[in-house]
Amino acid sequence: MKRSKPRLAVFKFASCDGCQLTLLDCEDELLAVAGQVDIAYFPEASRAMAPGPYDLALVEGSITTPHDAERILQVRRRARVLVTIGACATAGGIQALRNFADVAEYARAVYPRPEYLETLAWSTPVSSHVPVDLELRGCPIDKGQLLEVISAYLAGRRPNLRRTSVCTECKARGTTCLLVAGGVPCLGPVTQAGCGALCPSYDRGCYGCFGPAESPNPPALAGRLAELGRGPDEVERLFRTFNAWAEAFRGGGRPA
């Protein structure tokens, strides 16, 4: 008897679509993936809208509205394995900067009729609402890591994902440490590897796109930046970007 292909679904919440586009940018690899799975739901790429259940669901975006909070519960019920992809889905995204302010005040300042808005006070990761089987970091995610996750699922094994810091990638490619040699603000020591140390390779400090590394020490990095003449507000802004609401980063480098 012929075995049916695993059913793959891709869902979008509050996000820029960049992580979904990473899947589409896989090009030749995507054809191989498409041959191994049944892409049952992927509005970004297909008109097919199969209702589920799904074997593997990739979820992009943060939860920012009451409707999204209800919808992610429905997705979780229909998905056997749920993988969140990108900084929005894993840490609340850049939109989580609202969590440090008054969202109602923002709405009054930006929109002529804020009473028409229906939004949550906070932008939160998917894991704040439902159990998540795996988080794939990045803004956007790395194509190779995404393919590794899908391949590992098809093979029935754990994916091989790096959990070390960006500093290890700088060392591997022979990039001079910007923080040590040039005093350039850089989140590399506390950020998870996965980008190939892209920004440092162009003499730009790491922005923390892949979120906190395993067992990071933001206060120690903040202390080093202070020694280099960086004030508390500047250090806080460095941490509060793509993964501002990640637990290790939300304190802005200050001790807990």
Image (spheres, helix red, strand yellow):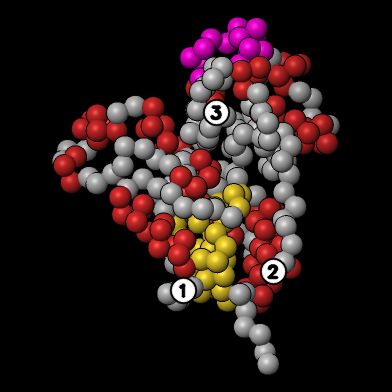
| Amino acid type of the residue tagged 3 in the rendering | Phe
Give SS at disc 2: helix
Work out whether residue 216 or residue 236 is closer to the camera in this orientation and state it.
216
Give the x, y percent position of residue 39. Answer: 55, 73
Q: Is residue 158 above or below residue 242?
A: below
State the CA–CA distance, disc 3 to disc 1: 36 Å
How many other residues sit within 10 Å of disc 3, few (<14), some (14-19) or many (≥20)?
Answer: many
Residue pictured at 59% horizontal, 55% vertical: 133
Sooner in the amino-acid sequence: mark 3 or mark 1: 1
Q: Find residue 22 and report its horizontal and vertical position in percent.
A: 58, 55
Give the answer, above or below, for where 233 lies relative to 127.
Answer: above
Q: Which residue is mark 1?
A: 52
Q: What type is the residue that disc 1 sits on?
A: Gly
Residue 40 in sight here: yes
Q: Is residue 194 above or below residue 247?
A: below
Question: Helix, strand, or loop for circle 1?
Answer: loop
Is 11 displayed left or right of 159 in the figure?
left
Q: Which mark is residue 34?
A: none
Badge 1 or badge 2: first in the primary sequence:
1
Magenta residues, start to end: 222-236
Q: Residue at x 54, y 20 (%)?
A: 256
Residue shown at 71%/41% (left/top)?
A: 163
Image spot of residue 74 (x, y percent): 40, 63
Q: Secondary structure at mark 3?
A: loop
Q: Which mark is residue 154?
A: 2
Magenta stretch, main secondary structure, is helix
**Residue 230, magenta (yes or no):** yes
Residue 249's disc is 3
